[in-house]
Amino acid sequence: MSSKQRVFNTTENAILKISMKYLGFMRVGEVLHLRGPFISLDALRTAVGCLQRRHPFLRSRLKNNPGSSNTYLMEEDSTLRLKIREIPRKRDQHLQFWKQEWREREKDIPIVGEGLAEFWLLQDPDDREDDQAPREIIIICEHCICDGLSLSTVAHELLLALGEEDKSLFKESLDWPVSMETAIERSLSRWNRFTIFSKFLLNMLYWQMTLGRKSTRLPFADVDFSLNDMCQHCHTEISSGTLNKDETQRLYDKCHQHNVTMNSAISSAILRALSIEVVDKTAPITYAVPADVRRRCSPPIPNHDLSYQVAGTAIFSIVANDTPTTVEGMWQLAKTFGEYINSSISRGDVMALGMMLGKIYENDNGLVSGTSPLTGGITNWGRLPFQERYGQWDLLEMTSFGNGARSPTPIAVVYTVNGVLTISFSTAAPIISANVLQNIKDNTMTNLHSMMT
């Protein structure tokens, strides 16, 4: 393999093939909500060009791998110009218009011979002379070459380039990112890999034979198609809630007081919200917790390496009827949840799952799919590297989104941007109704407000 190419590993190949087979499933994106002067298409092209000089995956085309059938590689091409769509909209549409566009485009699939990322520019042509008008830049990327942390870092870099800040950042290219499997392999001895993998496999088999077959789920709508055909008939429903800076700080202080993480407190609030909506309240809620591999490797993988570096912990479960109804009980659940997740991480479950995730996805048994027994889940991106101002533009907020049209399991994406906490739920509609998702979001935010008192 020459330095101009990067062969996809097992996990990357599997995720890419899932996107091809299931109409863009798991493709991810971010909306950068800006306020400031008119953004010309040339200015955005220049900024995207800066990203392409810095990140090998962004200046490369998807190719069939001649060395192995049904696998792929990325090949650098200096002539590649990533797709940039300029989409006019009216000023009063700036909050919701992007959702309509995503609804129409979310089922686009990766194409051999092209790049795996694209950009949209949304603004009102009549606001050309208004230096305080709302504008949106959207970045969309195939999940096989990014995760939430690296996509957010690249989005931050895009705004730096647009604002003409930190130009030295784009002078030299980064190396090809290390794959997750390689990073794990070089971080652990062969014996340690065998030990943690064996323990994880036994725990997973036990879970599948016990809780996994009995777990409860949200009510499915009466539809005239099979779950196997969800990707064709469903769309991604999204419902987001935020805490302002003061509320976010107050929740953080409460977490510190109770000696739990924000992730644990938010999960406690979500679990309580799920328990109200599930079909069988005498059965366990099963709850997935994707986890970052980057900082668990040696050496750690930097967030600016645009690549997929996500595995997960052991599945958490609690009988729906056993979820607490009091504030004190929810803090206790947060503590119990945190201890469970810490124990899973200490056992090496994240690294073990990272080693086998590609095989799981190859079998179409992804952690979230039409036949998934999971009730819900959370992926926490933490505090992201954005800043409040980039050159002439203010960043008002960032909204994450993705293709979840094959997922009847609501997943909460949690992140903090400039001190504001956002919890964005998504699932496949109409299998799960928009009302049910809205209830889960509303009740989660209500629970968090109660926990802050």
Image (cartoon, helix red, strand yellow):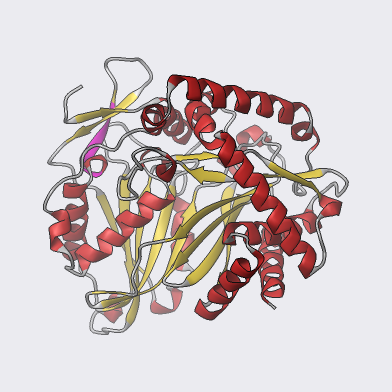
| Residue 273 position by quadrant | bottom right
Q: Is residue 431 visible?
A: yes
Q: Say whether residue 39 is left or right of residue 184.
A: left
Picture coordinates of residue 22 (x, y %)?
A: 51, 35
Picture coordinates of residue 124 (x, y %)?
A: 33, 75
Q: Say whether residue 45 is left or right of residue 400.
A: left
User: Would you place residue 66 above or below residue 403 in this image?
Assistant: above
Determine if the magenta segment contains residue 366.
no
Picture coordinates of residue 94 (x, y %)?
A: 42, 73
Give the extent of the magenta segment. Answer: 58-63
Q: Give 182 or 286, whichever is nearer the viewer.
A: 182
Q: Say whether residue 441 is left or right of residue 418.
A: right
Q: Main secondary structure of the magenta part?
A: strand
User: Would you place residue 260 above or below residue 188 in this image?
Assistant: below
Q: Quadrant of the N terminus?
A: top left
Q: How many marks?
A: 0
Q: Residue at x 17, y 64 (%)?
A: 166
Picture coordinates of residue 391 (x, y %)?
A: 22, 75
Q: Residue at x 23, y 65 (%)?
A: 160
Q: Quadrant of the C terminus?
A: bottom right
Q: Residue at x 14, y 62 (%)?
A: 167
Q: Give 291 or 69, whichever is nearer the viewer.
A: 291
Q: Residue at x 72, y 31 (%)?
A: 207
Q: Give 64 or 368, whichever is nearer the viewer.
A: 368
Q: Give 122 or 9, whichever is nearer the viewer.
A: 9
Q: Is residue 313 visible?
A: no
